[in-house]
Image: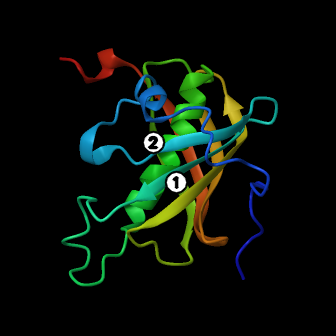
């Protein structure tokens, strides 16, 4: 049996994003085929919760190959979409420091239903622990047509541009 929805999004107006793709790009570094967040529609800075979505199209890079004739969104891309939402929230509100927020780990991931092109994947994330300048832990879910498609817990860590330079 799937868990209850992490957040109640029934009163959220998805037609009026608080951050559109251009605002997301000012915070998140992903571009082109690796952008997996369309908009952010709600946030609660007191309880550190956020709701966004990814509109899945026929032109996603994975559609032709995963799987031909039955395009099924890869689970790792679902998790990436949720991570981009949580990372956006953490970076936008300067919860971790660093230039970006990167994956530090994931736990208890469950895939509960398929995600196909031409649907909206609603993404829910809520921070459950913050260790300043070290890591933030978020519970997350992806929902399609009111049903939980996947859920789990992720750890975000601060990434500094200088870490990748030699």
Q: Nearer the viewer, residue 99 or 122?
A: 122
Q: Quadrant of residue 159?
A: top left
Residue at the far front: name it.
15
Q: Which residue bears the numbered disc 2?
A: 103
- Is 50 situated left or right of 163 in this image? right
Q: Nearer the viewer, residue 86 or 144?
A: 144
Residue at image coords 74%, 54%: 9
Q: Nearer the viewer, residue 59 or 110?
A: 59
Q: Is disc 1 in contact with disc 2, using a CB cutoff of under 8 Å?
A: yes
Q: Quadrant of residue 34?
A: top left
Q: CA distance from mark 1 to mark 2?
A: 8 Å
Asked whether residue 91 is in view, the answer is yes
Which mark is on residue 129? none
Q: Is residue 106 above or below residue 70?
A: above
Query: In this figure, which colouring scheme has been used for the structure?
Result: rainbow
The location of residue 135, given as percent across then percent down, is 58, 32
* Image quarter in which the N terminus is found: bottom right
* Image quarter in which the C terminus is found: top left
Residue at image coords 77%, 58%: 10
Q: Dot 2 surroundings within 10 Å: few (below 14), some, or many (20 or more)?
A: some
The location of residue 115, given as percent across then percent down, is 45, 72
The secondary structure type at the circle numbered 2 is strand
Which mark is on residue 106? 1
Q: Dot 1 surroundings within 10 Å: few (below 14), some, or many (20 or more)?
A: some
The location of residue 56, given as percent across then percent down, is 40, 60
Residue at image coords 26%, 47%: 33
- Is 86 situated left or right of 58 in this image? right
- Is 69 situated left or right of 105 in this image? left
The secondary structure type at the circle numbered 1 is strand
Residue at image coords 71%, 36%: 43
């Amino acid at each position: 049996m799937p868990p209850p929805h992490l957040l109640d999004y029934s009163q959220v107006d998805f037609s009026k994003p608080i951050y559109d793709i251009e605002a997301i790009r000012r915070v998140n570094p992903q571009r082109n085929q690796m952008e997996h967040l369309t908009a952010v529609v709600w946030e609660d800075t007191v309880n550190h919760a956020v709701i966004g979505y990814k509109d899945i199209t026929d032109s996603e890079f994975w559609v032709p190959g995963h799987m031909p004739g039955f395009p099924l969104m890869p689970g790792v891309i679902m998790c990436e979409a949720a991570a981009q939402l949580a990372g956006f929230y953490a970076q936008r509100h300067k919860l971790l420091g660093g230039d970006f927020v990167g994956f530090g780990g994931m736990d208890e991931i469950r895939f509960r239903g398929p995600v196909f092109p031409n649907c909206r994947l609603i993404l829910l994330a809520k921070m459950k622990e913050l260790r300043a300048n070290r890591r933030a832990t978020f519970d997350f879910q992806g929902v399609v047509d009111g049903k939980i498609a996947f859920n789990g817990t992720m750890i975000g860590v601060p990434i500094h541009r200088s870490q990748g330079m030699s």
